[in-house]
Amino acid sequence: MILLGKVMLDNNEKFISLMARVLKLNAADISDSTSPDNILSWDSFNGFMIISELETEFNCKFTMEEVFSVKCVSDIRALLVSKYVFT
């Protein structure tokens, strides 16, 4: 169980780091409510960069329906849970 917690923590850290890198933000500025509505750098290009980086980092694939359903960081977390990246 500790290992599972460690893996989840590592994946969360990777996720936050990825988001911060793509959006050119400090990791501390990323929250579940972070969205294109409140982050200027989260434009359509960076939105697709986030998806591409997530697919590479976590070895998963997203459908276009899933991509277009994303409105904020918490939506991305939900998708990653559905892909068993987070538990």
Image (spheres, helix red, strand yellow):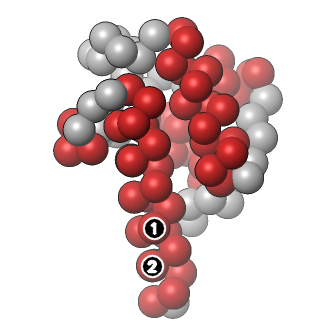
Residue nearer the viewer, 64 or 10 = 10
Q: Is residue 7 above or below residue 25?
A: below
Graded by Cα atoms within 10 Å as few (under 14), some (14 to 19) or many (20 or more), the crowding at tag 2 reads: few
Local crowd at mark 1 within 10 Å, few (<14), some, or many (≥20)? few
Disc number for residue 10 = 1
Please tell me in which quadrant of the rendered image residue 37 appears.
top left
x and y percentages locating residue 18 in the rendered image: 45, 43
Compared across the picture, whether 71 is left or right of 80 comes to left
Residue depicted at 58% across the width and 25% down the height: 49
Residue behind mark 2: 6
> Which kind of residue does numbered mark 2 sit on?
Lys
The residue lying at 51 percent from left, 19 percent from top is: 46
Residue 32: x %, y % from top left: 34, 39
Residue 2 is situated, as x and y percent measured from the top left of the image, at 45, 89
| Residue lying at 27% horizontally and 44% vertically, measured from the top left | 27
Badge 1 marks a residue whose secondary structure is helix
Q: Quadrant of the C terminus?
A: bottom right
CB contact under 8 Å: marks 1 and 2 = yes
Could you tell whether 5 is left or right of 41 in the image? right
Disc 1 marks which amino acid? Asp
Q: Secondary structure at mark 2?
A: helix
| Residue 37 vertical placement versus 76 (above, below) | above
| Residue 7 horizontal/vertical position (percent) | 52, 74
